[in-house]
Image: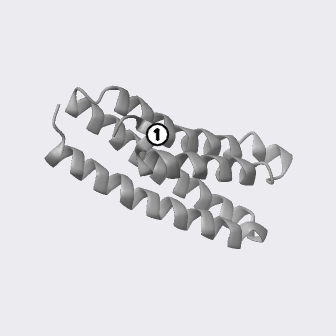
Amino acid sequence: MKSYQDLDIYKISLELFFETHRFSLKLPSYEKYELGSQLRRSSDSINTNIVEGYGRKTYKQDFVKFLLYAHASNLECHNHLEKLKVLYPEFDAEIQLIQEEYRKLGVKIHNFIEYVKTNWKT
């Protein structure tokens, strides 16, 4: 692995950020700046923490810490989407698809954390 860009979790989180960002702009204008903004920031945080953690990969514990932050931000996105599903049922189908992608990403991040904990050589 030459770069964070080689990580599947990086690629998936970046693509999911773009998808989530586009979705959030469909929300009513007042919500774009409330819950929509929180959703965009937490989605961005997943990807950003993966990159920052990789930048600290020499220190395994720092790498794991930032991957845990990414995982927590992933859960935060799922939670924001759950709220939006109730508030805006017209987006239910689209939100469910996005939530499923976050669920899959969460599993991948978790598995990568376990890999780094047990196999990462500094």
Q: Residue at left 51%, top 52%?
A: 12
Q: Residue at left 29%, top 56%?
A: 111
Vertical position of residue 50 compared to residue 114: above or below: above
Vertical position of residue 82 compared to residue 34: above or below: below
Q: Residue furthest right?
A: 29
Mark 1 lies on a secondary structure that is: helix
Question: How far from the left and from the top, in percent, is residue 27?
Answer: 79, 53
User: In this figure, which residue is indicated by the disc labeled 1?
Assistant: 5
Q: Residue at left 43%, top 50%?
A: 9
Residue neighbourhood size for the residue with mark 1, other residues' Cα within 10 Å, grouped as few (<14), some (14–19), many (≥20): some
- Quadrant containing the N terminus is top left
Question: How far from the left and from the top, in percent, is residue 19?
Answer: 67, 53
User: What amino acid does circle 1 point to?
Assistant: Gln
Q: Which of the pair 80/48 is nearer the observer?
A: 48
- Quadrant containing the C terminus is top left
Question: How far from the left and from the top, in percent, is residue 32?
Answer: 77, 44
